[in-house]
Amino acid sequence: MIRFSLAYGADGADEIERLSKQHGWHEDGLLEDGSRVAPLARWAVACVAYGRGGVASLQHLLTDRTLATFAIAVLEQVRTASCVTALLDYCMSTTALSDEPSDPFWQALSALNTLTSFDDGLVLPQDQQEKLRDLVIETFASATTSHQQTLCLCALRGAPIEGALEWAEAQTVTDPTVRRAKSAALKSLRRRLSGAYKPPSAEQKRQIRRQRALDV
């Protein structure tokens, strides 16, 4: 559904909306007999919003916790600089209400990690890298689970700027998973901060994505 919305824009949004009404797609994914299905109606709302209003419309959905997760998923697939801006602004203006990874805050931070931390990801301008670095440091300080600490360290890779490497080196962690995340973050930051590092070309990024798809 997300790909359809990206490909066909407003026309695709009209078709998604028509199908949702025609088939009575569920909002919460819970049927009368207690069984669960995909909450297609909420996916439809997010995809329709993007098809008609782009990233700005998805930002509006982020204010609704019942729709935020779906808006975040679409932003992650759109993969543009404006998506990163929207996700950063969201994370900096809200807090997690749950330790569960499904909480919209953690979902948004995870999306930022996906969009910026890998060699084929988006390269942020200096001001956004600073925001991401500061967000990670602040979030790590209040993290209560190994998943949260791991996510913070992974996301830090998208901010290879002054202060990020030094902060990561100074963190004392004992959980094996968090230690691996710290090691990966340090390796990535050192490589990206070295004078010999050259960002991959567009073709190299496509090759990286193809290889990742094969590895899944």
Image (cartoon, rainbow, N blue to C red):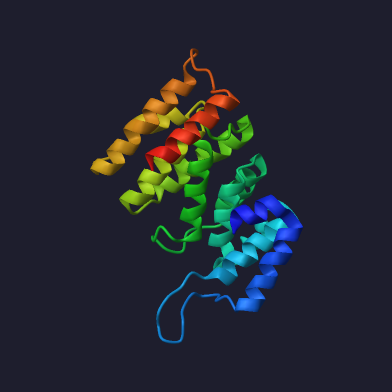
Quarter of the image for residue 71 reads bottom right
Can I make out residue 172 in this image?
Answer: no
How many numbered discs, if any? 0
**143, above or below 210, in the image:** below
Quarter placement of the N terminus: bottom right
Which residue shows up at 34% across the image and 38% down it?
181
Q: Position of residue 41 (x, y in %)?
A: 59, 71
Q: Position of residue 76 (x, y in %)?
A: 56, 48
Can I make out residue 104 in this image?
Answer: yes
**Viewer-proximal residue, 108 or 171?**
108
Extreme residue toward the bottom, this view: 32
Q: Position of residue 38 (x, y in %)?
A: 48, 69
Quarter placement of the C terminus: top left
**64, above or below 210, in the image:** below
Which residue shows up at 32% across the image and 31% down it?
183
**Viewer-proximal residue, 142 or 72?**
72
Q: Position of residue 98 (x, y in %)?
A: 42, 63
